[in-house]
Amino acid sequence: MSEKKPLIMIVEDNKDIVFNIKLTLEFNNYEVISAENGKEALDKLKKVDRLPEIILSDIMMPEMDGYDFFKYISEDHKLNMIPFIFLTARTSPNDVRFGKMLGVDDYLTKPFEEEDLLAIIAGKINRRKKIESINQNFQSLISSIQADLGPSISREDKNLVLLLIVFWDDLSGPLLKDYFPKDIKTSYSIKEIGQQLFQATVSIYGQDNITKSEGILLNIENIQKFGYIFFDSYPDSSTRSKERQYMIAVISPNITYFQSLKIKEIFEKISNLIKNQEKYKLKTYWKKISELLSTPIVK
């Protein structure tokens, strides 16, 4: 049986644009489905036998525009891991800034070159496959340190939120630096989960590339949790790479994409304190994050 072609969804009300993109993608061995607006796209996503690898969406559309469509996608756990790219003629700095603020994966302005579109799609698909591979490998990596998983717990339970910091050591590898709450009861070893998260996520970016802050949202299926992982570094001549690399992570029963954007802002504050070697109270930031996770951002 031949391997299925990658499926791309185009959400665009201009039929000429849809025709041209569809022609380009199908010529390059992609399968395409299309919709004229966000509402029609959501209806089709409910009926497809497999989800698309990429969503390409216009912004200005009737019935449901691109912003509202992306908002819905980002709040749905079955859909929010699909890379989302805006295709639009709106090129003002405010438009671009707003799209990026929402967390859209990319922003391609019309008219665009065929080569640019294909390159962006290929890059996003490769990165998504790598993340999926990490999730699969991660499940097998932590299976040896798991106790009983038990039932999934409601996200309103703040006591199940774990905040941890892991530093890279040239001799020992990932070392658990701090975590909160200290009395948390988990079905996994906090030390080992921290090490595995660090190693798994480094394999996405490559350890030599951790010179600027990077964040990633993971679904850790084996322990029925979500994790938001934030990597950063600061100059340190005592290390082999001359950079002190570290990870800040939160593990919780549930984390939405919009919540991960807010968590990143909190992690950036912690990271700045770490870089400046200032004291910080992890409990203070745990309270902020646990409150964030138990309160809807968008009602």
Image: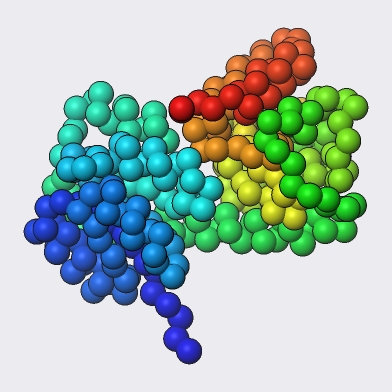
Task: Give the image quarter of residue 193.
Answer: top right
Q: Position of residue 94 (x, y in %)?
A: 25, 23
Task: Give the image quarter of residue 134.
Answer: bottom right
Q: Examine the rendering and report whether any part of residue 106 can be seen.
A: no
- Asked if residue 47 lies left or right of residue 35, the reply is right
Q: Position of residue 1 (x, y in %)?
A: 48, 89
Q: How is the model colour-coded?
A: rainbow
Q: Is residue 148 above or below residue 281?
A: below
Q: Position of residue 219 (x, y in %)?
A: 63, 49
Q: How many marks on residues?
A: 0
Name the residue at 11% across, 58% down: 15
- Outermost residue on the left side: it is 16
- Outermost residue on the top side: it is 278
| Residue in the foreground of this view, choosing between 4 and 187 | 187
- Asked if residue 41 lies left or right of residue 202, the reply is left
Q: Position of residue 101 (x, y in %)?
A: 39, 28
| Residue in the foreground of this view, choosing between 96 and 39 | 39
Name the residue at 86% across, 46% down: 188
- Asked if residue 171 lies left or right of residue 136, the reply is right
Name the residue at 31% across, 27% down: 97
Q: Is residue 206 above or below residue 166?
A: below
- Asked if residue 175 lies left or right of residue 9, the reply is right
| Residue in the foreground of this view, choosing between 293 and 266 | 293
Q: Examine the rendering and report whether any part of residue 143 can be seen.
A: yes
Name the residue at 71% across, 18% down: 287
